[in-house]
């Protein structure tokens, strides 16, 4: 136990196994309530794509309606990227109380609340850390503005309902931005699955779509530098407190502090009896402005300590970035194989970097399919809710390519068929292959719910529209649309649940009284 080396444990972590096993009991009870009798619970995963505030609100709507229809209790895994993770994390911090979550969401957008002072304080505090990056600035000064809340929760806050099996097992992800150049190659960077109870590093491959990341970065940059410029101007006292977007008055505490400070002569400022708290506040603020400027010039995101730094790298320890097994003819069957434990270490990049830079996994594939596809998780049915802008089948294309490269079973769909679907998407598509999970794909904006107004809906909920355009009516409409997509497809979901229960457990196949 005294060794500082990091071991790779074969298969799923014991914490995940235990949580999933407890969850099975709840799933079986849920299936019975849905009038599906099964001796074993099929493993169902729900996925939420990225899409900013649109994805956040729509994902809340999906989860709320699934809860209402008794479907959420039949889910084993819940995974998301980008905007969907905002909704998913709220589910756990509120113990699955969707009514309370909806009420809170409507309250926030009724009053158009945003506490700038608290957000700025959090950002300044974060800037004191060695690991400060644009991710901290983005979270506290942009995302908190968009969602009208300042999340204080951590993964550890989700532990109790997950360990007890009362809620699905959550899986989140980030991608390694330091390996960006290799994203354009066949062998892409690692995807870090940050699942509760996971003490090992599970590195899986993801096929990069870096062109999308660059395009998105430009839009992000405009917002980022606009906010930073306003803060710098305020700090220099060159302009009066400006009006925020949407006509909201800025908090004046910072400006007043700086004005009072500049009224004080330099000689007086240096006196020992000067208020140390005020002096420290200005120093911290200026340090924050400086650090943010440096991070912006370097475009540095997601800085975090690499706990594998300088760890011994041997054939029985955590392995290389270049996972040789994923290039072989068979998909990985365990974490040890995924880590390349059976071969020598060819790349020591993981132990040579003091810091990692982890960024939004949605910049690669805008949905968390790779998190639930490993055979060790034995997922039978995937409900994929796509909230992305533009073509709702781009995530299917990217995942198909990813699975083809790494020999992972995934339903194959002809490109011509995907092109046809994208012109007038329906509310649900059921994709089945000879092996692997059944995939149900649900585009948010579809002809069933939106009629011929899909483009208008998309424009109203554009990814980079500011939160001020999201009035209560706009939020309620989006919630209702997301709920409708679940409600209108409940029978299809139930039918596939019954089918996979019977397919994977044929000895005592699933039985249903009636689905009509």
Image: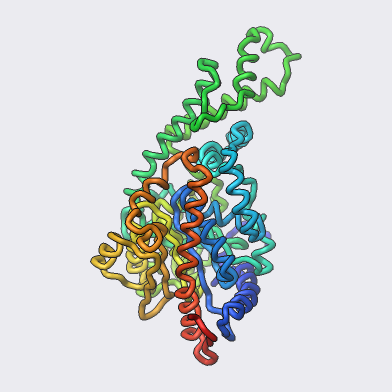
Give me the residue at 44% from left, 71% from top: 332
Quarter of the image where the N terminus is located: bottom right
Q: Is residue 315 left or right of residue 420?
A: right
Q: Position of residue 440 (x, y in %)?
A: 42, 70
Which residue occupies the foreground of this view, 24 or 67?
67
Question: Is 266 drawn above or below residue 377 in the view shown?
Answer: above
At x 56%, y 82%, the residue is: 36
Q: Look at the image and tell me whether residue 3 can be seen.
A: no
Measuring from the top left, give residue 117's x and y in whole percent.
62, 31
Q: Is residue 293 left or right of residue 209?
A: right
Q: Residue furthest bottom?
A: 507
Question: Where is residue 178 shown, x and y percent of the image?
Answer: 43, 47
Query: What colouring style does the render use?
Result: rainbow
**Residue beneath the point at 59% across and 55% down:** 89
Picture quadrant of residue 21: bottom right
The residue at the far left in this view is: 416
Note whether residue 201 is visible: yes
């Amino acid at each position: 136990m005294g060794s500082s080396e990091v071991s790779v444990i074969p298969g799923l972590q014991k914490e995940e196994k235990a949580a999933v096993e407890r969850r099975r009991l709840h799933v079986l009870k849920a299936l019975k309530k849905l009038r599906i009798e099964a001796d074993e619970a099929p493993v169902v995963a729900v996925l939420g794509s990225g899409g900013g505030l649109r994805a956040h609100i729509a994902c809340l709507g999906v989860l709320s309606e699934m809860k209402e229809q008794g479907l959420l209790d039949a889910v084993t895994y819940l995974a998301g990227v980008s905007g969907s993770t905002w909704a998913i994390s709220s589910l756990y911090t509120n113990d699955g109380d969707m009514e309370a979550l909806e009420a809170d969401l409507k309250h926030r957008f009724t009053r158009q609340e945003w506490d700038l002072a608290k957000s700025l304080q959090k950002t300044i505090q974060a800037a004191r850390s060695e690991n400060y990056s644009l991710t901290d600035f983005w979270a506290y000064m942009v995302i908190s503005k968009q969602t009208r809340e300042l999340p204080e929760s951590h993964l550890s806050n989700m532990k109790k309902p997950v360990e007890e099996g009362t809620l699905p097992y959550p899986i989140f992800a980030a991608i390694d931005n330091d390996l960006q150049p290799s994203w354009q190659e066949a062998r892409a960077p690692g995807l870090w699955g940050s699942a509760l109870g996971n003490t090992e590093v599970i590195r899986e491959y993801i096929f990069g779509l870096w062109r999308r990341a660059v395009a998105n970065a430009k839009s992000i940059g405009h917002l980022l530098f606009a906010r930073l410029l306003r803060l710098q101007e305020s700090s220099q006292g060159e302009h009066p407190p400006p009006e925020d977007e949407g006509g909201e008055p800025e908090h004046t505490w910072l400006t007043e502090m700086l004005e009072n400070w500049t009224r004080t002569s330099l000689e007086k400022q240096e006196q020992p009896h000067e208020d140390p708290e005020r002096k420290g506040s200005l120093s911290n603020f200026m340090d924050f402005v400086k650090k943010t400027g440096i991070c912006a010039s370097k475009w540095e995101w997601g800085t975090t300590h690499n706990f594998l730094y300088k760890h011994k790298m041997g054939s029985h320890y955590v392995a290389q970035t270049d996972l040789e097994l994923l290039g072989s003819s068979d998909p990985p069957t365990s974490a040890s194989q995924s880590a390349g434990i059976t071969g020598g270490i060819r790349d020591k990049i993981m132990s040579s970097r003091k810091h990692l830079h982890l960024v939004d996994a949605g910049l690669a594939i805008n949905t968390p399919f790779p998190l639930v596809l490993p055979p060790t998780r034995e997922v039978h049915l995937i409900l994929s809710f796509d909230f992305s802008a533009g073509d709702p089948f781009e995530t299917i294309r990217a995942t198909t390519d990813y699975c083809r490269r790494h020999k992972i079973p995934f339903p194959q769909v002809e490109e011509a068929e995907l092109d046809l679907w994208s012109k007038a998407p329906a509310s649900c598509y059921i994709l089945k292959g000879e092996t692997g999970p059944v995939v149900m794909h649900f585009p948010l904006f579809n002809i069933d719910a939106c009629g011929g107004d899909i483009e208008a809906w998309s424009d109203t909920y554009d990814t980079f529209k500011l939160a001020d355009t999201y009035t209560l009516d706009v939020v309620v409409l989006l919630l209702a649309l997301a709920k409708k997509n679940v409600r209108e497809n409940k029978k299809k979901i139930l039918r596939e649940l019954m089918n996979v229960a019977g397919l994977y457990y044929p000895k005592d196949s699933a039985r249903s009284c009636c689905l009509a």
